[in-house]
Image (cartoon, rainbow, N blue to C red):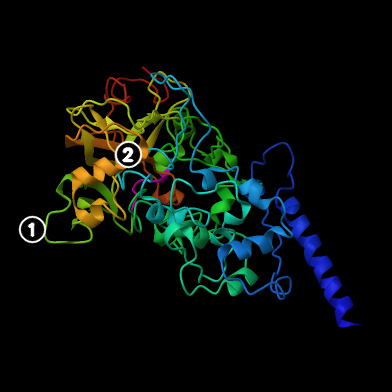
Amino acid sequence: MKKSNLTWIVGAIATLVIILAPVIYFLPKGDKRSDDPWQNLPLHPVHTAHAAILEDRGPFETGQDVTKACLECHENSASEMMATAHWTWESEPYDIEGHDEPVTIGKKNQINNFCIGVQGNWSSCTSCHAGYGWDSADFDFDNEENVDCLVCHDTTGTYVKSTAGNPAEGVDLMDVAKNVGIPGRENCGGCHFKGGGGNAVKHGDLDETLYFPPDRVDVHMGEHDFLCTDCHRTEAHLVSGRSISVSLDSKNQIACTDCHTEELHEDERINVHLASVACQTCHIPSAATRDATKMYWDWSTAGNDDIEESTHEYLKIKGSFVYEDDFVPEYRWYNGTADRYILGDVMNPEEVTSINLPLGDINDETAKIFPFKVHRGKQPYDTVYNYFLQPKTVGEGGFWTEFDWDLALRLGSEITGMEYSGEYGFANTEMFWPTTHMVTSADQALTCGYCHGEDESRMDWEALGYYGDPIDWGGRFSAKR
């Protein structure tokens, strides 16, 4: 057989597999969910070897060169990706009480109590953006060639992103492109395990131990070798699941009951709890079980040369920290939605401001008691206008360069379009992070005595709206006040 004919046949087969793989991945398994959770998992697509397909396409000098090659076969992939929050870092507009115009929520334009905000700090913050070249407010979100295919599809472990999301110097783009595959834990974790500036910093239930976790750390990823996409199912590049820090609705959520039935416990007393208690509350008894996570961040001490630097206690550029490992979550009613502090909202500096307060209470039939990591912080605000400020931290004039709060806040206010009085202070905030990963095996789940009985309970029953421990006053646990 002639080499040209063989090449054509290989190419035709590869193209057919590329077309069919997504179809196979999302083949419906029937309208009714099976009682067997294994039958409810998505099928993984058939892997397509790309080495022969890309043999004559290089060399690739930039990430955009790779994307152009990808789009020759995957014509719709970039446009699909560009419709997701992984690309926009911004939600659809919401109508919010107290605001005359609809407001969008997302990393792109809102503050947090970690690194505070992206605006003005693009080149550093966007190193985890699924695109190339976002180094200013003028980034072209409509250019398909700016989409980074490799960050989610690299299988070599050698692909590293740098400032503004561009590939780090020295990455062999051709080798990475030839070895793309379905996203694995390493792809998702490369950004999500390092949120907030480093491993384990932000979430408390997402860190590098989940690359290859022991069974007792995470039963799904450990014992059963799950991929992230087994739960965060993906269609047309839209990954299911969302964070309450960057959304205000309950769309696109995932749940344990996507695979498990609600009546899966043999003991009916446990099943009764499910009306009021999230699965995670019992099955994630603690978080940050291996790697310590940041629980407190005080920006007011940053810039002090008299404090000795220590990674988990103090850095001159960032201030003071408190880290904890194996911590017990805090429990709140949660209906899947949250309130949100919007940049420019007036706050009370004498009170703790909740950046993303979980919504729901004891009378909300859609809410359940849910475990959270609560990250507390102290961050700059304008003492005249009484709202939080977005400082410029990176680059010329940034706090990490000049260690001048007034300058950093003035530059940040110019970028965000906010008024700055020239007077600033630091106020207390809190952010809530649902604890949903690091699910233990059934034999490690909480038993009755952790929440009920004579010993100290991890539940603050009165704060949750009960008169006390439901057992003491004879009410069913599922019965709300």
Query: Which dot marks residue 21?
Result: none
Residue nearer the viewer, 312 or 178:
178
Magenta stretch in the rendered image? 283-288
Q: Is residue 235 visible?
A: no
Task: Please identify the quarter of the rendering in which residue 332 is found.
Answer: top left
Task: Please identify the quarter of the rendering in which residue 177 is found.
Answer: bottom right
Give the dominant element type of the magenta stretch: helix, strand or loop: loop
Q: Amino acid at mark 2?
A: Glu
Total number of numbered discs in the rendering: 2
Instruction: Name which residue lies at 55% across and 57% down.
Output: 226
Q: Position of residue 448 (x, y in %)?
A: 35, 38
Residue nearer the viewer, 41 or 87:
87
Dot 1 corresponds to which residue?
306
Query: Which dot marks residue 414?
Result: 2
Q: Residues within 10 Å of mark 2 (few under 14, many from 20)?
A: some
Query: Which comes sooner in the sequence, label 1 or label 2?
Result: 1
- The magenta stretch spans residue 285: yes
